[in-house]
Amino acid sequence: MKKLPRPLRNAVVVAALTGAVSAFAALVPTEWRHRQEITVTAPGVVRVELPDATFDAAQPDRSDLRLLDPAGRETAFVFDRPTVVLSRVVRPASFETRLENGNTVILIKAGTTDERVASLALETPHPHFLRPARIETSPDGSAWSAVDEGVPLFRQWGAEKLSLPAGHRPATWLRITVNGTTVPFTGAALTLAAGPAAEPVPVGARITTREEFASESVLTLALDGRHAPLAALELDTSEPLFMRRVIVGVRDVRDLVSGERTVGSGTLYRVALEGAPTHAQLRLDFNHVPLARELLVHIHNGDSPPLAVTDIRIKRDASTLLFNATAAGTYTLLSGNPQTKAPRYDLASFIEQMRAAGATIVRPGPLQDMPGYQPRTSLAEAPLPDVPLTGAPLDAEGWTRRRGLQLTAPGVQELELDPAALAGARTDFADLRLLRAGNQIPFILERTGLARSLALTPEIITDAKRPTVSIWRLQLPHSSLPLLRLALATDTPLFQRQLRLYEKVTARDGRTYERTLANGAWSRTPEPGSPRTRVFDLADRPQTDTLWLETDNGDNPPITLTGVKAEHAVVRLVFKTAETDGFALLYGHPQAVAPRYDLSLVARQLLTTSRQSARLGAEETASEGFARGALRHLKGGAVFWGALSLVVVVLLVIVARLLPKPEAPR
């Protein structure tokens, strides 16, 4: 059948679309908070490229978007997302490994010539390695064509790359040569090529904060808008040689407990050595529609120094609106109505015809407030300023520790507990209270998956009775510090030891006993890449401020510790305030019951809002608590009883003067 000319084809499509548009019930534009103008110069199919502001103003699923023609009538449209062509993963027909000239050679028979092989992923149980590889393809197993060489394969510190490019070729055979012989490869999976994917478009984003935690860096990204369908992250760094596991997360609330939800993860790397081809993967693909203008990017550094990041770019899929303009003029795009449902247009059945037609590409004008905006009911979006700022009064009797707060600006605050507060508070943090002018300030407790590290100095202790045993004393800054783990580092090249971490605790009867907190084996070999660190997870919270680490060397020389780091969890209090002074944190009450605040009802809105950083001041202690009232310092003391005695004496004198004097005897 002869293909119609494009103008005639467009005319046929427009005619079909015009017949597909049904009558709509009249809508009230003032029920939408925002509007944008779209200028159409001629009738026909129109493709609208949506800016970040449109996604931000609309609901997350874009169910509230509506389009009005120049006469103010509702116009049907279809939301067009790029077509995703899924690739297929298959097992090879055969997999064989052999050793040649000190290298590992892997021979794979793909078993197909009809489909192109995009990549392959090797499988290995080896926990820690880094090797360059060469990949070749062949139609018959004898004539080989190189695809790439020097491609890094690795698995280190949680990051791994076991995939290799196959050149999108219709290959029957593949040959991979891996330098070295110590890594056993047990299988492979082939990814058959998918159709070309539409390139995502940039989204406005910037790095607002960067914090260094134990073995990881956390970068906070501020997005220019919410609700855009994010598709990729691209990392900018000048580092020539690195590999890092990267996790993209968002703040989340589940069962009134604050945390973080992972929305994407992968390994980014670059290998750029002089005289060798550069290999890099600096893009991480993921799919997420953010409910807040914030992303958290975790870069896991392992034992390497923090990665120098110059920029992070975020991209979204190239989603557009398609509609049939029956006339030229100014169309209006409405957004911002949480009370409406998604429309159901017959036009959705013609999306393939609309894609095939020659569409005019336009962009809407700036977002404008709707004049006379009036939501349908009073159930419109509940703004965050409605959260309660003040709770019930609190008598501070029984709270033995107090810290002032330093706030830089009003708004939502984030207060991280330092080691002193973590050590002084209860394990369940039920004794934490925020106060201002005698009233509680409602807060939400946020337990993150992050950790801070404290550098400890190991002190060698000699035990004459046990000359083969190495003992180190580790001094903590506070007693009862809730440690998660202990990381040890050494330069000793070859050893195998069993270590025990413990503390010496004094029981109520005065006897001292050893309380084991962690134990396990630690070994190292001179092989390149052998880890120089060992992490021990603690079974319980230390009760004292001194830890002891010991190992029996037997007939071997002692090992040398080059560094010891103790890690504790990051715990935060999140609250909102309109003031910046007069705030205090109370803790150290063994019988306190965990508070219950109505603030938990809006926890999601609060925790996903941009925050200010509050800081703790110096600690004050009171053995009997910070009780309210002018006589709280007199309670139970000599001054109190002296004052009370003086009052009693004065009262007795006054009463004695008021009593009638006895008459003299006649």
Image: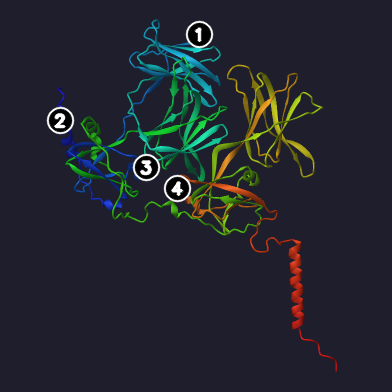
The residue labelled by disc 3 is: 60
Question: Marks 1/4: CA distance?
Answer: 58 Å
Q: Amino acid at mark 2?
A: Pro
Distance between mark 2 and mark 1 Cα atoms = 62 Å
1 and 4 marks in contact (CB < 8 Å):
no
Mark 1 → mark 3, Cα distance in angstroms: 53 Å
For the point 58% across and 17% down, the residue is 528
- Report which residue position mark 2 lands on: 7
Q: Judge depth for marks 1 and 4 and give the one in front.
A: 4
Q: Label 1: which residue?
A: 98
Residue type indicated by callout 4? Gln
Circle 1 packing at 10 Å, graded few (<14), some (14-19), many (20+), is few
The image quarter in which residue 60 lies: top left
SS class, disc 4: helix
First along the sequence among labels 1 and 4? 1
Residue 482: x %, y % from top left: 64, 40
Residue denoted by label 4: 605
Q: Amino acid at mark 1?
A: Arg
Of circles 2 and 1, the one toward us is 2
Q: Secondary structure at mark 2?
A: helix
